[in-house]
Image (cartoon, rainbow, N blue to C red):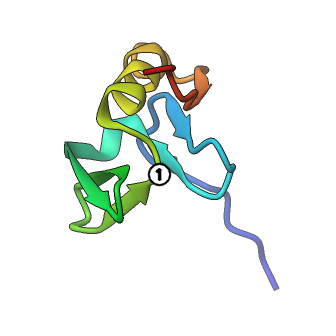
Amino acid sequence: MSIRPITSTPAFKGLIVSKDDKTAVNTKHIISMKETSDIGSPQTQIYLIDKTIRTINAPLRDVLTAYLKASPNDCNIEHIKLSKN
């Protein structure tokens, strides 16, 4: 059995991680985001290039704050922090 070397790596830009560490999203794969509400608690839906949707239990403004910190560099990993209203 021979092992073939990895010849390509997936495109990667910064990573945003949900506050509960259950969801992580590569910022390079994000197409758009929108805020929704489920039983009064704000959520953000993140639409990805592979046509999947990730839902994070945080307001859009908090997700965008993490996105802006994570997206400039592929070494950046930013946890979403909930802001005080």
Image position, residue 8 (x, y; %): 49, 49
Image position, residue 59 (x, y; %): 36, 38
Which residue occupies the extreme bottom position in the image?
1
How many labels, in total? 1
**Quadrant location of residue 68?**
top left
Image position, residue 14 (x, y; %): 49, 28
Q: Eyeballing the image, is 53 above or below 19? A: below
For disc 1, the neighbor class at 10 Å (few under 14, some 14 to 19, many from 20) is many
Left or right of 8? Residue 5 is: right
**Quadrant location of residue 77?**
top right
Left or right of 66? Residue 37 is: left
Which residue was labeled with disc 1? Answer: 57
Q: Eyeballing the image, is 29 above or below 61? A: below
The answer to whether residue 29 shows anywhere in this view is yes
Q: Quadrant of the C terminus?
A: top left
Residue at 53 percent of width and 35 percent of height? 15
**Quadrant location of residue 11?**
top left
Secondary structure under badge 1? loop
Image position, residue 65 (x, y; %): 40, 19
Q: Nearer the viewer, residue 61 or 11?
A: 61
Q: Quadrant of the N terminus?
A: bottom right
Query: What amino acid is found at the position of numbered circle 1 in the picture?
Result: Asn
Residue at 29 percent of width and 54 percent of height? 45
Left or right of 42? Residue 25 is: right
